[in-house]
Image: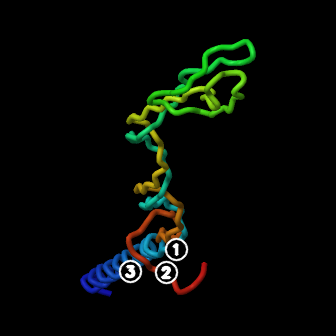
Amino acid sequence: MDSDKIRPLIKSNFNLFFIIGIFFLIMTLFFIFAPTKTIKEDIEVSYSEQESYNVTEPHDVTEMYTQYEKGKESHWGLSGGTVIEDCGECKCHQWISVSKYLFEGATTFCDYCICESKGFRTVTKYLEISKIRNVTKTRIEQRPTEVNWIFGFNTPYTLHLPFKL
């Protein structure tokens, strides 16, 4: 054989083996890094929710009041004493019937007087109020994630092999 004919044959075989080798290398890398599998990952997700609660709040109220004070008191008995016949502006608590023989000229007298006074005062009262607030809560959810089938790194694409290894 002529050396001029062998040289192009070797060169063409070398190019052919080089191209086939590169092709197998690319295919091997593709089958190692490209296929993915789907796994479920626990992810903490926040969400907003309205929550109602009760609060006791103070508030001031102006109210009318009536105050009673014990006024004049009668002292009477067998030993004698003073008897109230008129309470003036105050009211009589109880009228007592007394025999004519103890006190001449009178038949009923007041036991004791009660004086009534009215006015306004400010009082603090408490109301139970229901309020609503927005609350941010978290929960754990499972989400599917695509990872490389050998090394487990996350991938942005899905490529499942049609066969199981």
**Observer-nearest residue: 42 or 2?**
42
The C terminus - image quarter: bottom right
Q: CA distance from mark 3 to mark 2?
A: 26 Å
Near mark 3 (Cα within 10 A), the count class, few <14, some 14-19 or many ≥20, is: few
Q: Mark 2 falls on what kind of element?
A: loop
Name which residue lies at 75% across and 16% down: 78
Q: Position of residue 58 (x, y in %)?
A: 43, 40
Q: Which residue is mark 1?
A: 38
Q: Name which of mark 1 and mark 3 comes first in the sequence.
A: 3
Nearer to us: label 3 or label 2 = 2
Q: Name which of mark 3 and mark 2 comes first in the sequence.
A: 3
106 over 56 or under it: above or below: above
26 over 58 or under it: above or below: below
- The three-letter amino acid code for the residue at tag 2 is His
Q: Position of residue 90 (x, y in %)?
A: 48, 30
- The three-letter amino acid code for the residue at tag 1 is Thr
Near mark 1 (Cα within 10 A), the count class, few <14, some 14-19 or many ≥20, is: some
Q: Name which of mark 1 and mark 2 comes first in the sequence.
A: 1
Q: Position of residue 163 (x, y in %)?
A: 57, 85
Q: CA distance from mark 1 to mark 3?
A: 33 Å
Tell me, yes or no, whether the two marked residues, 1 and 3, touch with CB atoms within 8 Å. no
Nearer to us: label 1 or label 3 = 1
Q: Which residue is mark 3?
A: 20
**Observer-nearest residue: 58 or 113?**
113
Instruction: Return the mark for residue 160.
Output: 2
Name which residue lies at 47% across and 36% down: 66
**Observer-nearest residue: 54 or 18?**
54
- The three-letter amino acid code for the residue at tag 3 is Ile
Q: CA distance from mark 1 to mark 2?
A: 9 Å
Name which residue lies at 52% across and 74% down: 37
Instruction: Return the mark for residue 163.
Output: none
Tell me, yes or no, whether the two marked residues, 1 and 2, touch with CB atoms within 8 Å. yes
